[in-house]
Image (cartoon, rainbow, N blue to C red):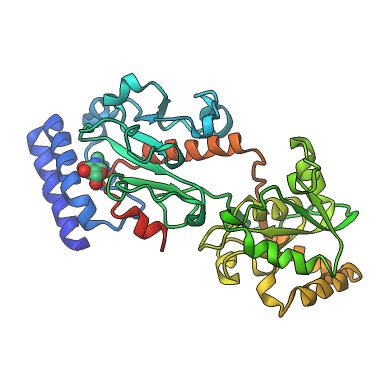
Amino acid sequence: MLYSSKAHQVVLIVTCWLSGIATCLLFLQYSQSNFQSLVFPSKQGKTLSEISLDDIPKEVTTPAVQKDKPILLLWVWPENYRFDLSDCQTYYNIDGCRIIDDRNLYNQADAVLIFHKSISWDLSNLPPSPRPAFQRWIWFHVESPTNTHRIPGLENLFNLTLSYRRDADISVRYPLTVSKTPIKGFEIPKKDKLVCWFVSNTNPSTGTGTRMKFYEEFKKHINIDIFGNMAGNHLKDEEYFPTMSSCKFYLSFENSIHKDYITEKFNGPVSVGTVPVVLGPPRENYEQFAPHNSFIHVNDFASPLDLANYLLQLDKDDEAYSRYFDWRKHVNATRHLNNLKQEFVTYICHACEYIGVHKEYKEAHDIYKWYFS
Ligand SMILES: *[C@@H]1O[C@H](CO)[C@@H](O)[C@H](O)[C@H]1NC(C)=O
């Protein structure tokens, strides 16, 4: 497969060379749409056009390749949070695309970002069809499958997926970065609480039953400081991280249990120097995101009582507790955002960055089969 694709490129480049650059670009575009999806695995780093264009002498290509930046149309503002369209450039130095929210420019948009939760059941608020041939639709969804409306008719409409899943086209996560040289200067923050939990949603219909059941038993054996709507003491934005870091342990209990569904409930404590006690997908899945000794997994204990006893024992043993931070010598943890609006901004910036780099033709088939598996 790959070999024939290489041969194909060579033929293309030669054809390009002979036929002049304008025809060549058209031809590349065309060939890309026909072969890309067949030949390349979706996560291939280099796209066909990148590979081929590299081989064409620079001075010839300059005027033709210096196209305008691709346009990303935000079809709706997610959850109605609005932000400044230049934020990606201002805060993340991402300017690979032009973000717009003006639907009048729909026909010029290279990609359209469509927020799943705002799609109506009858699909009447989707962008119009037929869409321009070059345009790609991005399925933008960051909730877990338990909390996803399976709106019929969306299965084969999109070209790209944006999700927390590692195998999404645009995977939005806060990565931990491994440093080759030892990192100095990390100190465990001062602690005045043992176990904390920030929780607002206790509605069992959102799948939160598992964690509530665990909590009800667990709290009989250990003191837990609760913040959030459930306890009637809501934390202000500026209190969020300082409060979290003042706890030795933090209950990172996901509302529902799904592969890769490891949210800010985990990244938060990890980044501020608190040990997360996780309830979510299996330990192996967490270890794909963070060092094995950076968290405590509830599945490693036979019962809530055993877990409580273990935490109480760590509370008395500073040496053992500090081992949960050994990984800090080699790994950096970027702090996540604690505000939904900012989170949406970063997701949208990820999409912008992606379409600035990836131009290849793609169809996302059966997104529900993928997403609910
Ligand atoms: C996008 O996906 C749709 C639906 O599968 C497909 O018809 C269209 O050709 C794709 N377009 C591009 C540019 O990838």
Left or right position of 77 against 107: right
Pick the front one: 188 or 9: 188
Pick the front one: 24 or 131: 131
Q: Quadrant of the N terminus?
A: bottom left
Q: Is residue 27 above or below residue 285?
A: above
Q: Is residue 62 above or below residue 121?
A: above
Left or right position of 116 against 193: left
Ligand 1 picture quarter: top left
Residue at 32% across, 46% down: 154
Position of residue 126 measured from the top left corner of the image (x, y, whole percent): 33, 34
Q: Quadrant of residue 91?
A: top right
Residue 56, visible in the rendered structure: yes
Q: Quadrant of residue 339?
A: top right
Position of residue 344 measured from the top left corner of the image (x, y, whole percent): 54, 37
Q: Quadrant of residue 5?
A: bottom left
Pick the front one: 151 or 114: 151
Residue at 84% across, 75% down: 309
Position of residue 324 measured from the top left corner of the image (x, y, whole percent): 76, 66
Q: Quadrant of the C terminus?
A: bottom left
Pick the front one: 259 or 56: 259
Position of residue 77 measured from the top left corner of the image (x, y, whole percent): 48, 30
Q: Is residue 359 above or below residue 125?
A: below
Residue 52, visible in the rendered structure: no
Left or right position of 319 against 299: right
Figure label count: 0
Residue at 75% across, 73% down: 304
Residue at 9% across, 42% down: 15
